[in-house]
Structure formats: structure tokens, C-alpha cells
Amino acid sequence: MRIIKKETDYALRALFFINEKGGKIPVSEIYSQIKAPKPFLRKIFRMMASFGILISQKGKNGGFEFKKPFEEITLADINDIFDERTTPGGCPFKSKICANYKTCVLKGKISEIEEETHKRLRNTYIKDLWR
């Protein structure tokens, strides 16, 4: 079971880099540090901006900076941007709604585990992970 997606990993690396450098960081500088495909990182940055984590400024002096203070960002804030949570009736093992949902012996326990995991992510601040 993968708890943290690749997008979340790259997002965290980018946020740590932006925090370390301070201020508005040009995209090119972030790309060279993170070493991930540019289209992939562009999508990640766009999503973090749309969820209120970063501010994007275009142009010659453009770049990304924090909208939400670094100290207040939790793992859940970042993970929830990229994690497709299981919907009611959904199965964590399949991408389609399960026909056996009503009689499934796993759904209750899996839902409980997912909720406990999400609670821990909500209580983990990324500042505590940054060295």
C-alpha cells in the first residue's frame, strides 16, 4: 500500500527547497534542484497554487512563494491535493465501485485504517520533517 504518491513527494521536496531559499524562487531554479520532468512539476505547482499553498507570479521576476505559511502546512494539506480518496461505495483495491460493497468484509476495517492514517497526516506538520 502506498500512502504517499510521487506527486506528494515532489511537492514536499519543492516546498522544502522554497523554504530553504526564502522568498520568491524562479521555476528554473526549482526544476534544476528537484530534477523531475518539467510538465510534471508544472502540474504539481499549478495544483498547489490552486489549493492555496503557493502563489505563482509570471514574468521576468516571477516564481513561486508561499501563500500559506510553511509552519502551518500539514502532510494532509499536500497529500489531499494529489490523493484520490475512496468514495462511498468505492473499493480501495479496485478503481470501479464494487458490486459486493454491502457484503464486503474489508470495507469497514480499511475505512478505519484510512481515517487513522489521514488523522496522522493532519497532525504532522511538514516543518517537522524538514531538516
Image: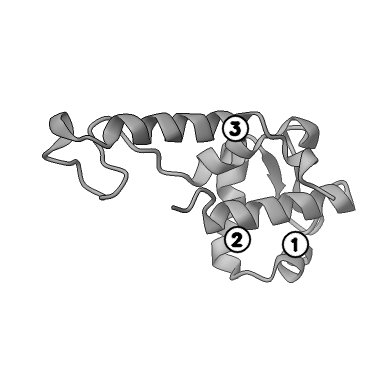
**Secondary structure state at the residue bearing disc 1:** helix
Above or below, 62 against 73 in this view is below
Q: Amino acid at mark 3?
A: Arg
Secondary structure beneath label 2: helix
In the rendered structure, find residue 41 and report the number of the disc placed on it: 2
Q: In the rendering, which numbered label is found on residue 76? A: none
Q: For the view shown, which residue lies furthest in the left direction?
A: 99
- What residue is pinned by disc 3? 120
Q: Earlier in the sequence, mark 3 or mark 1?
A: 1
Viewer-side label of 3, 1: 3
The answer to the question of whether label 3 and label 1 lie on touching residues, with beta carbons closer than 8 A, is: no
Q: In the rendered structure, which amino acid carries the disc numbered 2?
A: Leu
Identify which amino acid the numbered label 1 is placed on.
Ile
Residue 98: percent from the left, percent from the top? 17, 41
Work out whether residue 105 or residue 64 is closer to the camera in this orientation and state it.
105
| Category of crowding for the residue at label 2, using alpha-carbon neighbours closer than 10 angstroms: few (below 14), some (14–19), many (at least 20) | many
Corner quadrant of residue 78: top right
Q: CA distance from mark 3 to mark 2?
A: 26 Å
The numbered mark, 2 or 1, whose residue comes first in the sequence reads 1
